[in-house]
Amino acid sequence: MEIIDKIIEKKLTPNQFYVLVSIRDKVSPLYINLHQELRTLLSEEWLTKTEAGNMELSSNAIELLNEVESLFKVQKKKTNNTIMGAEYSENIEKYTLLFPKIRIPTSKLPARSAEKNVEVVFKWFFLNYKYSWDVVLKATAMYVDELQTKNYAYMRTSQYFIKKQEQDKTITSKLADYCSIVESGDDLDTGFHFKEKVY
């Protein structure tokens, strides 16, 4: 949306922007009325004509393409390290080891999910919540200790504890609940859940 907003801010249509990119990259744009778009881009001074009659990007067009490209590069730099911290692998391992190496009595699922699956949901978690790894590990230890007293009945797997889609299509995070408890110092209030509606 940032890219679309930038194009609209400059009073360009997506098709016109596509033409500018195509001219820069020396490719033929498809499925558009090219002559109409070229006329508009020329009159709005996004393009200039050379003496030989060829179309060329104006300085404004070059500047806009560079701006949009820089937005895209910033988005691409959101790596696992920037989202979950430089030591995310070690922290995921610590997290996983907090769960018992058993099958949960009620669901028969392994309590410890595959670390790659856990990594995927942790990426979602850290994009949506701003808790530190210290809080995450304390919250997890609290949850596991509590479930141990119940012989691990109805325990969530290490993956589903972080993120789980319920039957009503909401996404719940028990981990977020417990992180909130750790940060506030309150006693556990069962029945309180963070939820995100999935449409």
Image (cartoon, rainbow, N blue to C red):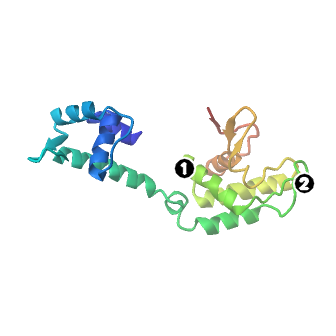
Crowd around label 2: few <14 · some 14–19 · many ≥20 (10 Å): few
Residue lying at 74% horizontally and 45% vertically, measured from the top left: 188
Residue 138 visible to the viewer:
no
Amino acid bearing label 2: Asn
- What residue is pinned by disc 2? 151
| Residue farthest toward the front in the current orientation of the protein | 52
Q: Could you classify mark 1 by the number of other residues whose Cα lies within 10 Å: few (under 14), some (14-19), or many (20 or more)?
A: few
Seen at 83% across and 52% down, the residue is 147
Does 148 appear above or below 49?
below
CA gap between label 2 and label 1 equals 33 Å
Residue 135 seen anywhere in this rendered image of the structure:
yes
Find disc 1 in the rendering and name its residue.
Answer: 127
Residue at the image position 62 percent from the left and 47 percent from the top: 184
- Looking at the image, which is closer to me, 109 or 76? 76
User: What is the three-letter code of the residue carrying label 1?
Assistant: Leu
Q: Quadrant of the N terminus?
A: top left
Q: In this orientation, which residue lies closer to the viewer: 95 or 145?
A: 95
Kindly state the secondary structure of the residue where label 2 is placed: loop
Picture quadrant where residue 89 is located: bottom right
Which quarter shows the C terminus?
A: top right
Across the whole image, how many numbered discs are drawn on residues? Answer: 2
The answer to whether 117 appears left or right of 56 in the picture is: right
Whole-percent x and y of residue 83? Answer: 52, 57
